[in-house]
Image (spheres, grey):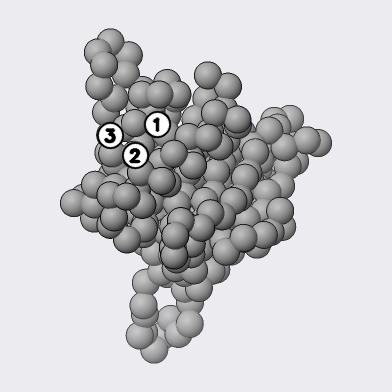
Amino acid sequence: MASGVVPSKQAVANVAGHHTETVVMKFQDQLFVVATQFMKLGTVVHVTRDLITDEIQGNVPMFSTKVLMGKDEPLVHVMAKAIVTELNPPTAIVLTLALKVTTPDAMKEITDLIKTCL
Amino acid sequence: MEPKIQLFDFTENFSDTTVHFKLMVLDSSFFVWIGTDPKLANIAVSMPPKYDDLPSTSTLLGSKSEENSASLSLKLAKKFKQQVFVSCSVPFDPQLSLLIEKRLMEELKQRIGS
């Protein structure tokens, strides 16, 4: 479904034995990304792109994460950064995570699933 | 595999303003976006009341002084007894707000079992 002024797409997969769904809504100024195994939004994280003018780091994208709602624990920030770095979008992202498995392999599969929605 | 999350898009013309709606129905919660521009300026969340009559609300994104989304999410949480996420960015106009609310209620009654 990619109609209307704000295109949205969803995908379904089985990740580590759990029914997993992702939804991406492409707003002009922001990306709204849902990754869930509970069919709820869960933790809401706002990821913004940092501007870097570093000669050594060059064009390496950097992101700041802020938990808007839910558990503000290190793992959430790590997962959000891992996903967003992989997606590397030009805009800020509102990312919602509600996951049962948080292993690196599962994260990779979930990130790939989100990519199919972009 | 069939998706369990349902997405609905619809557009409505109120006199000379075109308002777009996006609805995402999740497990015992839903997300609503209402806007004239394709932007996500704010998000408010409300939880249904458990003991007393008044749901609680919080602004997740955007200006805290923006009351539109917060008040709408309160009303929806109370009515549907679910967790509600609302993002509403339309020009302030009491008449328009009323029409939007009416249209949204029609849609929600169809899409959400309560």
- Whether residue A65 is situated above or below residue A34 in the rendered picture: below
3D distance between C-alphas at marks 1 and 3: 11 Å
Of pointers 3 and 2, the one earlier in the residue sequence: 3
Q: Residues within 10 Å of mark 3 (few under 14, many from 20)?
A: many
Image x and y of residue A118, in percent: 65, 62
In the displayed orientation, state which residue is furthest to the top. Answer: B51
Mark 2 sits on what residue? Answer: B72
Q: Residues within 10 Å of mark 1 (few under 14, many from 20)?
A: many
Residues at marks 1 and 2 touching, judged by CB atoms closer than 8 Å: yes
Name the residue type under label 3: Thr
Image x and y of residue B67, in percent: 24, 47
Name the residue type under label 2: Leu
The answer, for residue A37, to whether it is visible in the render is yes
Identify the subunit bearing mark 2.
B
Residues at marks 1 and 3 touching, judged by CB atoms closer than 8 Å: no
Mark 1 sits on what residue? Answer: B76
In the displayed orientation, state which residue is furthest to the left. Answer: B65
Mark 3 sits on what residue? Answer: B57
Identify the subunit bearing mark 3.
B
Identify the subunit bearing mark 1.
B
Q: Please state if A84 lies on the left or on the right of A118 as rendered.
A: left
Could you say which is closer to the camera, residue A115 or residue B8?
A: B8
The lab-note entry on whether marks 1 and 2 share a chain reads yes
The residue sitting at 51% across, 58% down in the picture is B13
SS at circle 1 = helix
Image x and y of residue A105, in percent: 67, 45
3D distance between C-alphas at marks 1 and 2: 6 Å
